[in-house]
Amino acid sequence: MQTSLLMQLLQALDDGQLKVVDLTTPLGPDTVVIDLPPIFASSPGVTITKISRYDSDGPGWYWNTINMGEHTGTHFDAPVHWITGKDLPQNTTDKIPPRKFIGPACVIDVSGDVSLFEDFLLTIERVEAWEASYGKVPAGAWVLLRTDWSKRKGRDAFLNVREDGAHSPGFHRTCSEWLAKERDVLGVGVETVGTDAGQAGTFDPPFPNHHFMHMNGKFGLASLVNLDQLPPTGAIVIAAPLKLVDGSGSPLRVLAITP
Ligand code: MN
């Protein structure tokens, strides 16, 4: 009998033709959460409280209670997260069709630019230059912005907040709108704490990547790691958020399968 496609996939994973790359950062009390200006409510850090650990509360078992915001650590942004996506169909974590949790990855490496300029913004022209080398970004792809930002150690270096706010890379507003409308991407993924640049609160519109992506029913992935282990094309990303009822997003395990 012919070996099925799925059995071939498993065989390729077993024999090393394909490998699994974990794009997820550890989730725990040290996980860095975004700071908003004090006039807004902020998201709590991760708290883990023991229910029992082989003790009088549960002599044979260990389990914890977890408490955190939906947008904590490596996490998924659903369209309903932003006001521009609030009235779209299937815009919450429990309603998004599961087929959309698997897509090809287009990895755009701007780490050299970001090492020179922390506020680097991806432009349409830069994506078109990438496409000249690797082909057009296909509909339904994740565009992953490799900045090497995830290699920054510690909260201060990662958030990089100065007197005038955070400084970290992201997307030019025209690029976000173009990726959503002209390339029909699944969404964008980044290594920073959120999918907008650190200074994006000062842009017009504010936080344009959230604004345009979610307006068009697209998703976001934040705080990714190991993007340097992915080829520019040829990997697929599996990113399935928790099926939270009416959820705006959730922490998740993001996996890539790469050649
Ligand atoms: Mn988020």
Image (cartoon, grey):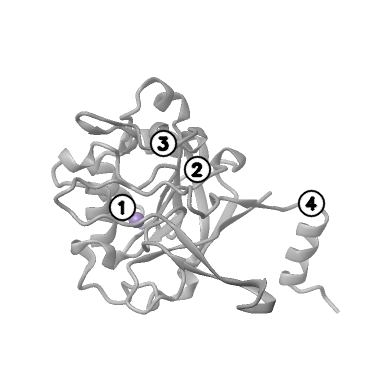
Q: Residue at x 38, y 33 (%)?
A: 156
Residue labelled with disc 1: 182
Is the distance from the Cβ of mark 1 to the nearest ligand 1 atom less than 8 Å? no
Q: Quadrant of residue 169?
A: top left
Residue labelled with disc 2: 107
Q: What is the three-letter code of the residue carrying label 1?
A: Glu
Residue labelled with disc 4: 16
State how far apart marks 2 and 4 are (Cα). Answer: 21 Å
Q: Secondary structure at mark 3?
A: helix
Q: Report the front residue among 163 and 222.
A: 163
Q: Position of residue 174 (x, y in %)?
A: 23, 43
Q: Position of residue 197 (x, y in %)?
A: 30, 39
State how far apart marks 1 and 3 are (Cα). Answer: 32 Å
Residue 155 tag number: none
Q: Reply above or below: 202 against 5.
A: above
Q: Position of residue 136 (x, y in %)?
A: 44, 46
Quadrant of the image for the N terminus?
Answer: bottom right
State how far apart marks 3 and 2 are (Cα). Answer: 21 Å
Contact check, label 1 and label 3, Cβ < 8 Å: no
Is the distance from the Cβ of mark 4 to the nearest ligand 1 atom less than 8 Å? no
Q: Residue furthest front?
A: 56
State how far apart marks 1 and 2 are (Cα). Answer: 18 Å
